[in-house]
Amino acid sequence: MDENDAIQILKKNDRLMKILDSAEKLQLTNWYLVAGCVFQTLWNDQEELPLMSGLHDIDLVYHDPTLALASSLIQDKKIENVLSQEFNLTFDVHNEAYMHVWKGRKIAPYQSTENAIERFIATVHAIGITKSAKQITLFAPFGLDDIEHRLIRPIYHPDNSKELYETKVKKWQSRFNHLTIEQWQDQRNFIDKANKS
C-alpha cells in the first residue's frame, strides 16, 4: 500500500470525509485527523467491513503556540461539543503545542503537529490526514507497511514507555483481529540498532 492507495481508500469513507471538511472549516493551524480514525478505516477496508465500523471517537489535533493554554482548553472543548453534536461521535481535540503540559511529565514541547505524530506510541498509530484547497495530505512518518500488515511496533522515544505501549496493545488486541505484536525491547538496544542502520 502506498500513500495514494491509502488516500483513495480513505476517500471511500464518506463520513470521515465530511468530518475532514468540517475540520478544515475550523481554520486551525497545522491540523490533522489522526490515529484510529485513519488506520482503522484502512483495516476495515481490508476486512471488507463498513469503513466506520468500530469507530466511535475521532482525534483532531493541531499546533498553535500563539494561543494561551487556558484559551486552548476552552477552544478545544467548544470544538469537541460542536463536532460531537454534528456527527454523533466522540471527539478529542488537542493543541499539540501544550501536550508536554498535559502529559504531566518533563518532556520537550512539540514543534509541530507532525513532530507530535512522530512521537505517538506505535507505528500504526502514527498517521494523520489533513485537507486544504480540496487536497488531502497524508502524513505517516513510519510508512504504511505496518498498517497494511497489522504489525504493532513501538515508537521508542523518551516520551513513551513500556507501560503506555502495553496498555495500548491490550486495548487493540481486544478490538482487532490478526495483529502481530512486537514486544517492547530495551530502548538502548533499539538505539544501537538504529545507529547501525
Image (spheres, grey):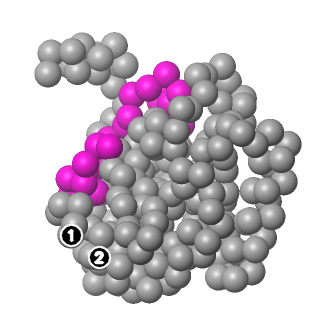
Q: Quadrant of the C terminus?
A: top left
Left or right position of 155 against 26: left
Crowding near the residue tagged with mark 1, few <14, some 14–19, many ≥20 C-alpha atoms within 10 Å: few
Res 62 visible: yes
Query: Is 93 covered by the magenta stretch?
Result: no
Residue 197's disc number: none
Q: Main secondary structure of the magenta part?
A: loop
Establish if 73 lies above or below 34: above
Mark identifier at residue 9: 2
Q: Quadrant of residue 39?
A: bottom left
* Badge 2 amino acid: Ile
Helix, strand or loop at mark 2: helix
Amino acid carrying label 1: it is Asp
* Left or right side of 100 for 144: left
Q: Which residues are magenta?
A: 141-164
Q: Residue at x 40, y 43 (%)?
A: 122
Q: Nearer the viewer, residue 48 or 129?
A: 129
Q: Seen from this angle, which residue lies furthest front?
A: 133
How many numbered marks are there? Answer: 2
Element on which disc 1 rests: helix
Q: Does the CB distance between marks 2 and 1 fall below 8 Å?
A: yes
Residue 5: mark in rendering: 1
